[in-house]
Amino acid sequence: MLSTTANKITVFRILLVPVFLLLCYGGLRIPALIVFLLASLTDMVDGYIARRYRQITDFGKFMDPLADKILVLAAMCYFVEVGRIPGWALAIVLLREFAVSGMRLVAIEQGRVIAAAWSGKIKTAATMICLCLMLLIGPPEPWDSAPDFIAQISTAVILITTVYSGIEYFWKNRDVFRRVD
């Protein structure tokens, strides 16, 4: 399971999530941002190492995307709780994630693997960048509406890329459901 460097980095990313949340809830925004950035960057690093050094494993194929979802959804849950992201926006992101995961499970039953599309990679990168911006700007002051504006734009970008990539996954793989009994 943890025999490869890539898998160890993936597990490290998951272990950073509680650290990130503790920092967020402790009011330590900049350290939380640093941990979130580190965790986000490990996504690129473990993927590169896995491909470059032929360390692609079933564990990595399963855990790498799951680690991304855990990190992003933990951050979004925090932002919902502190009033930066509306709950319905998180619900849309969750719906897309569950729907795409479900579609992949159906495809696996048919002996087919649905690889990550570029739109999904762009969605992940855009989401992580937007969440970093939201961590960076801090809580709004009564005299300053910029943090709320940035949070609203970031939420819009997250939603647009999430919905687009979800639609693309389903459109490109719609034949998966034609074979379902």
Image (spheres, rainbow, N blue to C red):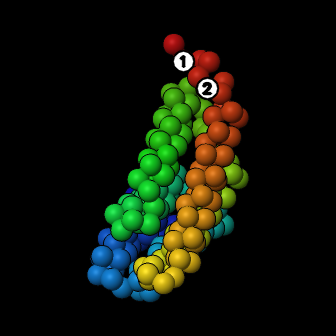
Find residue 51 and report its horizontal and vertical position in percent: 64, 62
* Structural distance between the alpha carbons of marks 1 and 2: 7 Å
**At 54% across and 18% down in the image, what residue appears?**
180
Left or right, 74 with reference to 25: right
**At 62% across and 59% down in the image, what residue appears?**
157
Asked where in the image residue 110 lies, by quadrant, the reply is: top right
The answer, for residue 33, to whether it is visible in the render is no
Find residue 113 and report its horizontal and vertical position in percent: 60, 38
Figure quadrant of the N terminus: bottom left
Find residue 176 and report its horizontal and vertical position in percent: 61, 26
The answer, for residue 77, to whether it is visible in the render is yes
Check the image and report above or below for 160 versus 23. above
Q: Nearer the viewer, residue 42 or 73?
A: 73
Q: Which residue is the site of mark 2?
A: 176
**At 60% across and 32% down in the image, what residue appears?**
112
Find residue 15 and report its horizontal and vertical position in percent: 35, 70
Crowding at mark 2 (Cα within 10 Å: few <14, some 14-19, many 20+): some
**Residue type, numbered disc 2:** Val
Check the image and report above or below for 49 versus 77. below
Crowding at mark 1 (Cα within 10 Å: few <14, some 14-19, many 20+): few
Q: Nearer the viewer, residue 55 or 110?
A: 110
Q: Nearer the viewer, residue 178 or 165?
A: 165
Element on which disc 2 rests? helix
**At 55% across and 64% down in the image, what residue appears?**
152
Residue 158 numbered mark, or none: none
Q: Which residue is the site of mark 1?
A: 180
Q: Nearer the viewer, residue 78 or 48?
A: 78
Asked where in the image residue 16 lies, by quadrant, the reply is: bottom left
Residue lying at the far top of the rendered structure: 181
**Residue type, numbered disc 1:** Val
Q: Are marks 1 and 2 in contact (CB under 8 Å)?
A: yes
